[in-house]
Image: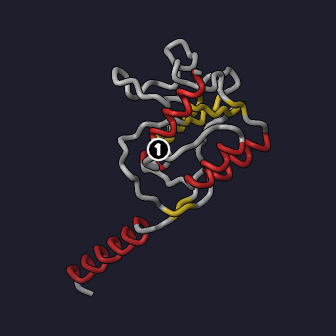
């Protein structure tokens, strides 16, 4: 085989390999990939403050931000942790984001033995987008089974809605 033919064959093979791996519809992940002692779920940011539209989950001193409605967070037992990790680590179809501007209202926080945050996932069920620290796959996003995760959160007692107005109404009712 001539050199140009070999180069063409290598290039074609490489492109085929890249296309076959990048078109994969589902992924499996071992997130969070760090040791942890406990897991807590948080609901926050139900009413958007125009001066601080995306508040941090925690203040600089490690206490939950004032927008957290379930401070100090809902601590999961071992069975709930197992179920949550199964949801987070299951292969799932890629989803398209709806583009609400990413206003996460839920967080999953994994704490180490010292009580420090070892990993976090901030979730916006409205636009189906999340951010995770540490990121999986060297920065590439995994998909979530948002329906299963929302059902789980509701089951353990956290409100999950599909629109900002529902979150805002819920938070206003809490203040009454």
Give the quarter of the image for residue 69: top right
Q: In the displayed structure, does residue 64 sit left or right of residue 124?
A: right
Percent of width and height locating residue 152: 67, 47
Q: Residues within 10 Å of mark 1 (few under 14, many from 20)?
A: few
Q: In this orientation, which residue lies closer to the viewer: 167 or 59?
A: 167
Coordinates of residue 36 in the picture (x, y in percent): 68, 33
In this view, the residue in front, 64 or 140, is 64
Furthest toward the left, the residue is 4
Looking at the rendered image, the quarter that the N terminus falls into is bottom left
The residue located at (65%, 27%) in the rendering is: 73
Residue at coordinates 35% horizontally, 41% vertically from top-left?
101
Q: Residue furthest bottom?
A: 1
With respect to residue 140, does 61 lie above or below? Answer: above
Whether 121 is drawn above or below 25: the answer is above
Image quarter of the C terminus: top right
Residue at which label 1 appears: 163
Circle count: 1
The furthest residue to the front:
176
81 horizontally vs 169: left or right: right
Question: Residue 34's image quarter?
Answer: top right
Residue 54 relative to residue 58: left or right = left
| Mark 1 secondary-structure assignment | loop
Query: Which percent across, then down, holds residue 113?
Result: 70, 25
Colouring mode (rainbow / by chain / secondary structure / one colour): secondary structure
Residue 45: where, in percent of width, then height? 48, 29
Residue 142 visible in the current orientation: yes
């Amino acid at each position: 085989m001539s050199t140009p033919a070999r180069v063409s064959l290598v290039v074609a093979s490489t492109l085929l390999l890249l296309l076959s791996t990048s078109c994969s519809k589902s992924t499996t992940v071992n997130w969070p990939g760090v040791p942890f002692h406990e897991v807590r779920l948080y609901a926050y940011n139900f009413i958007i403050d125009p001066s601080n539209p995306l508040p941090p989950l925690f203040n600089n001193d490690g206490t939950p931000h004032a927008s957290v409605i379930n401070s100090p967070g809902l601590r999961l037992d071992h069975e709930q942790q197992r179920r949550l990790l199964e949801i987070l680590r299951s292969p799932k179809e890629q989803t398209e984001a709806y583009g609400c501007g990413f206003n996460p209202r839920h967080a999953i926080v994994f704490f180490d033995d010292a009580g420090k945050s070892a990993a976090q996932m901030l979730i916006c069920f409205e636009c189906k987008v999340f951010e995770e620290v540490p990121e999986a796959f060297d920065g590439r996003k995994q998909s979530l089974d948002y329906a299963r995760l929302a059902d789980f959160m509701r089951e353990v007692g956290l409100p999950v809605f599909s629109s900002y107005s529902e979150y805002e109404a819920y938070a206003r009712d809490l203040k009454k």
